[in-house]
Amino acid sequence: MIVSAKGRAACESPDYVRTSTAAAMTMGFTPGRFYRDARLYCVNLLLTYEEGCSARCAYCGLSEGRLIPGHGEDQSFIRVDWPTVPLDEVVRRLGGEQSSHVERVCVSMITNLRARDDTLDIVERLKPAAERISVLITPTIVDEGWLRELKRSGADMVGIAVDAATPELFDKLRGSGVGGPHDWGKYWATLAEAVTVFGRMNASIHLIVGVGETEREMVDTITKAHGMGARVHLFSFFPEEKSLMEDHPQPPMGQYRRIQLARYLIEHDLAESRAMAFDGDGRITGFGVHGEKLESIIDLGLPFMTSGCPGRTMENACNRPFANDTPAQAEMGLMRNFPFQPNQGDIRRVKAQLG
């Protein structure tokens, strides 16, 4: 059962949630087939309200300042549609055979004060059907006490979408630069609290490559998060229609590949950022690992897979198929986050793209 925009006022959280197209396909709400038979191992859910999100992030499909005529609050997000579905039906389907391979559920808040209590309610209701639950939290509207309530409700991991790699970019794209409510210091303070409450490597940040930072700045921010005991999940910028950044280009493949490799090396303690080399433009020219060792790491393909929260058997259960590119781009060899183990042909292309 998918709810259309008509009569939308009654279809709000906590009784209703939006779910990604990939998750809707996985749970049988929407027909479809993934390119190269990829499978989704983490069901992504998003809180939804008639008044929407009060943030104004320049690149986001949910921004208060972005509205596609005729779509209202049913507008796309991260490139695809997010249909509205009843939470009770999600719980039922998660317990069914079709979703038996799913290893994690991720609940995403939006910047809306109602989301604080509703997120706790949703996590409690999901718990009987989901062994592992992550929550992408909004630091602007929560505190450490709320984080402890979230853990008691059943969440085992939290994520924070820092997105921008520098305080200047964060303020420009999410704070005063767009009249938004978010603050760089608050986000990092909340990350520290999340690590305290949930434990090391049970908190994470999202970073978007290609919104104006240098590769060196991105590496520095990855290093900062790792030093705090947090994971780093990478996204490649993709322009959202009608957002303030709809004309901003995607980052070059080489830039994204180098950051993917650097993140993997740092997060797995295979190299330190201080051992990496950069040119005058902040571009990575050395990874602090050389020769056959670096070659063997690249050949694994793991650095170029989607970075996400782990599941029961998988390091990256949250594999978000094609959230950063279109299937057409993937067909052209431009898949940015592999939702499956890259094959030898994929690795050859990755090596060429690394530059």
Image (cartoon, helix red, strand yellow):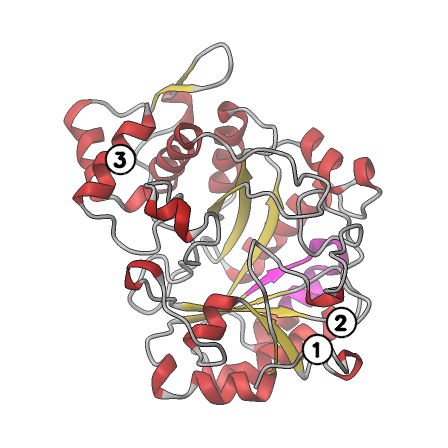
Dot 3 amino acid type: Arg
The label shown at residue 49 is 2
Which numbered disc, 1 or 3, marks the residue closer to the eye? Answer: 3
Q: Is residue 207 magenta?
A: no
The residue that mark 3 highlights is 349
What residue lies at 69% left-to-right and 80% top-to-bottom?
14
- Give the image location of residue 60, x and y in percent: 67, 49
Q: Helix, strand or loop at disc 2?
A: loop
Label 3: element kind: helix
Quadrant of the frame with the C terminus: top left
Mark 1 or mark 3, which has the lower sequence index? Answer: 1
Amino acid identity at mark 2: Tyr
Q: In the current view of this chain or complex, which residue is farthest to the left?
A: 292
Range of residues picked out in magenta: 135-148
Does dot 1 land on a helix, a strand or a loop?
A: loop
Instruction: Give whichever of discs 1 and 2 has the lower sequence position.
Output: 1
Question: To which residue does mark 1 refer?
Answer: 13
What type is the residue that disc 1 sits on? Ser
